[in-house]
Amino acid sequence: MQRQSVDRKELARLAAATGAGVPQAALEPLAEYLEMLCQWNKAMNLVGPHTWQDMLTRLAVDSFYLANFLDALELPESPLCWDLGAGAGLPGIPLRMVWARGAYYMVEVREKRALFISSVLSRLQLTSTHIFRGPVEHFFQGQYYKADCILSRAFMPWRQLLDLAGPHLRPEGALVILALEPAPRELPAPWKLLRQQSYVADGHGRWFWALGAGAENARLTYDAATHQAG
């Protein structure tokens, strides 16, 4: 597979123009990732965009906005994070270039995409970043601890995601959804909106939702206990 070279100066210029706050230290690993993505994409059709410029502005830029969003959440200093349906490593791989807290597991059932992620991780050596190839249900079965943060980008409709991810999220944890629309005004109980952020990428509005269910569960438990005591 022929490798498409990423011009480092152009990358720095385009990254700055996104307004996502891409740090200088992330530019070289980002360039290597985009080069690998272009190379593999020709043979495997991993993502829609075909140039590294479009891959940056349409796909990778989300990860850098996401880093700031995650830092604004009340997560542990070293959170356990699961990225469901990781695809070609987006948002996970660019995210881990700038947000290296805790352990980060990408879960991808499609073999070619998981193989690509594995190859990228072997090359870039991102801190505590892993890939699991297989169904999400199989990944869940092998986990002893629940997650502090579960992320999803176009993995499945959000209502189904609540049912799937909820039992595997710590009571104080956050389910983070990358969306193309604002969060709904009403969520199924016991879920509530913890935080929301909008931003613009490639000329279009996008959103992060952080949803939690634990606080409401805790309140219901407290109310029940108080009622019994009375």
Image (cartoon, rainbow, N blue to C red):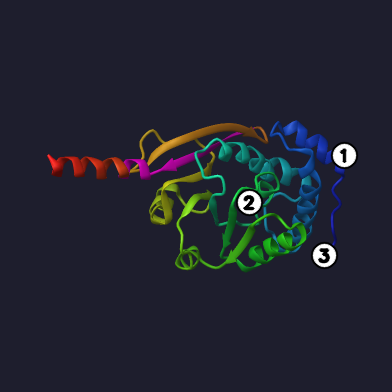
> In this rendering, does residue 189 appear at all?
no
- Between 126 and 185, which is closer to the camera in this rendering? 126
Of residues 170 and 131, the one drawn nearer to the viewer in this rendering: 170
31 relative to 148 in the view: left or right: right
Give the amino acid type for the residue marked by disc 1 in the picture.
Lys
**Disc 3 target residue:** 1
Quadrant in the picture for the N terminus: bottom right
- Give the distance between the C-alpha atoms of the residues marked 1 and 2, in whole angstroms: 24 Å
Between marks 1 and 3 in the image, the one whose residue lies nearer the viewer: 1
For residue 54, what is the image quadrant?
A: top right
Q: Which mark is residue 85?
A: none
- Determine the secondary structure under disc 1: helix
Residue 160 location (% of width, % of height): 41, 52
State the residue at coordinates (51%, 44%). 177
Residue 187's x, y, as percent? 36, 40
Residue 150 in the image: above or below residue 219: below
Q: Residue at x 79, y 43 (%)?
A: 27
Magenta stretch, main secondary structure class: strand
For mark 2, what is the residue? Answer: 92
Which image quadrant for residue 131?
A: bottom right
Which span is picked out in magenta?
204-217
Residue 67 colored in magenta in the image? no
Pick the residue in front: 134 or 202.
Answer: 134
Dot 3 amino acid type: Met
Tell me which corner region of the image, top left, top right, bottom left or bottom right, holds residue 134: bottom right
The disc, 1 or 3, on the residue closer to the chain's N-terminal end is 3
Residue 182 location in percent, x, y?
Answer: 48, 34
How far apart are the alpha carbons under marks 1 and 3? 24 Å
Q: Residues within 10 Å of mark 1 (few under 14, many from 20)?
A: few
The numbered dot on residue 9 is: 1
